[in-house]
Image (cartoon, coloured by chain):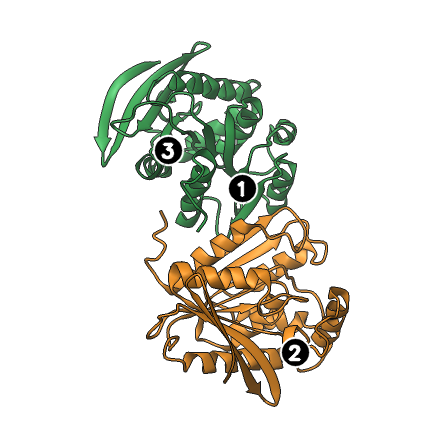
Chain colours: A orange, B green
Amino acid sequence: MDWTGDTHEVDGVLERGFVLKVDGRRVPGVLWTPPDAEGPRPLVLIGHGATAHKRYEYVLALARELVRHHQFAAVAIDGAGHGDRRANAGDDDMTIFSDFLGEWSRDGSTDEAVADWRATLDAVRRQPEVGDGPVGYWGLSMGTIYGVPLVAADRRIQVAVFGLMGLVGPTRERMAVDARAVTCPLLFIQQWDDSLIPRDSSFELFDALGAHDKRLHATPGEHSAVPAEEFVFSARFLARHLAPGSDDLT
Amino acid sequence: MDWTGDTHEVDGVLERGFVLKVDGRRVPGVLWTPPDAEGPRPLVLIGHGATAHKRYEYVLALARELVRHHQFAAVAIDGAGHGDRRANAGDDDMTIFSDFLGEWSRDGSTDEAVADWRATLDAVRRQPEVGDGPVGYWGLSMGTIYGVPLVAADRRIQVAVFGLMGLVGPTRERMAVDARAVTCPLLFIQQWDDSLIPRDSSFELFDALGAHDKRLHATPGEHSAVPAEEFVFSARFLARHLAPGSDDLT
């Protein structure tokens, strides 16, 4: 793991860029920690959606919330074909999304994304200010497409937030199998009027997830209109599971 | 409104029994307030489910939570054929439930329940320690059957929690009409494996509710297995709307 030197501190949150080599792939990421962090702490992996990137607005906001209010660490990486993994930073969203649909259909796409995340988890936990504390995952839409297989594969992850996805698309059969292996407590976020993801397919994915401790939160509106309330609930939900006592449920 | 003299204080919550006459009906209720309450404050009406009553465990717990942690007032009344409105306090749940199904089918059942609640609201707000503060409604199952028409009819109620119900049963057509007139922010609680209320009928009711600001929370399990998490969220949700700033969403 090489630090890029792109380091800055904003309102009590230290942000450091890094690059990781994983099976020959260059995986750029960002680690957020409290500036004076010492010793192990809970860590949340944040998987961005298609067309977004590791420092996209909601990724950054959630990471900062987890660091500032809970003294957690948070980490995000660019997905294949996203952020600094694109040759041309100026491509528009439709081009990026179109490329993503190709990537999603590519054999090895899911396995590589899982490997990228697991290598990131290994590397980040070697930092003493992150250490081997409890780990959570947060990722909607594309963040669920690759997050479900990741959480199924890596038992270090003990709580998850998924959503904006269903048993659809080129990896739906694998997602159905991996979903059964996801047994940690989870929140599933759904947009009630999502025209990208058929409502029933979301229910199928929610039903397929093997966790007993799960809940579905649905809000009217389109795919990308997840309300602030669900980000707030996400942070509290992750905190409750990764640092018991931090949210006393009152 | 006559106080019954059944008054006691538990851990910072003053509880007072009362009886109200509404169109010749005797409506017993309980009012909860902070012991030293002075002046107007938010008020939450708590409608119990079938076979329960005004001091049923979850009613009492929610009322105490709202008083203790938010300094709100809370009030509950026995529904027709429930609690102190039954001749025989020793009847078992199946008998009470069977009677409820008859009551639900009776012409005037909904109008009378709405009138009972509105008279309760009038009477309770005349108490100086309750006053004319903002009002919320909480009621699942039977508490939604009568709560939807109540909230549709009474514009003083500005936030609601419904659930465990669908567009089913003898009043489903009226519920569908009244639901459209419910435009306040609301939370809809659903049990994913509810064998009493078909899942799709719950979605129909959620869709019918006229509010733009609404959310559906679903948890695996049967009708009566609503988890503590949803009661906690309910209290926070009511507090956020009735006392802005009390839950800063962090």
Which of the two residues, A96 or A117, is positioned nearer the viewer here? A96
Q: Which amino acid is tagged 3?
A: Asp
In the rendered structure, find residue B92 and report the number of the disc placed on it. Answer: 3
| Local secondary structure at mark 2 | helix
| Local secondary structure at mark 1 | strand
Cα distance between the residues tagged 3 and 2? 66 Å
| Local secondary structure at mark 3 | loop
Which of the two residues, A232 or B94, is positioned nearer the viewer here? A232
The reply to whether label 3 and label 2 mark residues of one chain is no
* Residue linked to disc 2: A85
- Residue A235 in the image: state x and y as whole percent: 46, 58
Q: Are marks 3 and 2 in contact (CB under 8 Å)?
A: no
Cα distance between the residues tagged 1 and 3? 29 Å
- Residue B121 in the image: state x and y as whole percent: 44, 20
Q: Badge 2: few (under 14), some or many (20 or more) residues near its Cα, within 10 Å?
A: some
Is residue A143 visible in this depiction of the protein?
yes
In the rendered structure, find residue B96 and report the number of the disc placed on it. Answer: none
Q: Which amino acid is tagged 1?
A: Phe
Q: Are marks 2 and 1 in contact (CB under 8 Å)?
A: no
Of tags 1 and 3, the one toward the viewer is 1
- Residue A47 in the image: state x and y as whole percent: 57, 68
Q: Residue at x 42, y 21 (%)?
A: B132
Q: Residue at x 35, y 34 (%)?
A: B63
Is residue B192 visible in this depiction of the protein?
no
Cα distance between the residues tagged 2 and 1? 42 Å
* Residue linked to disc 1: B188
Q: Eyeballing the image, is B77 above or below A205?
A: above
- Residue B211 in the image: state x and y as whole percent: 61, 36
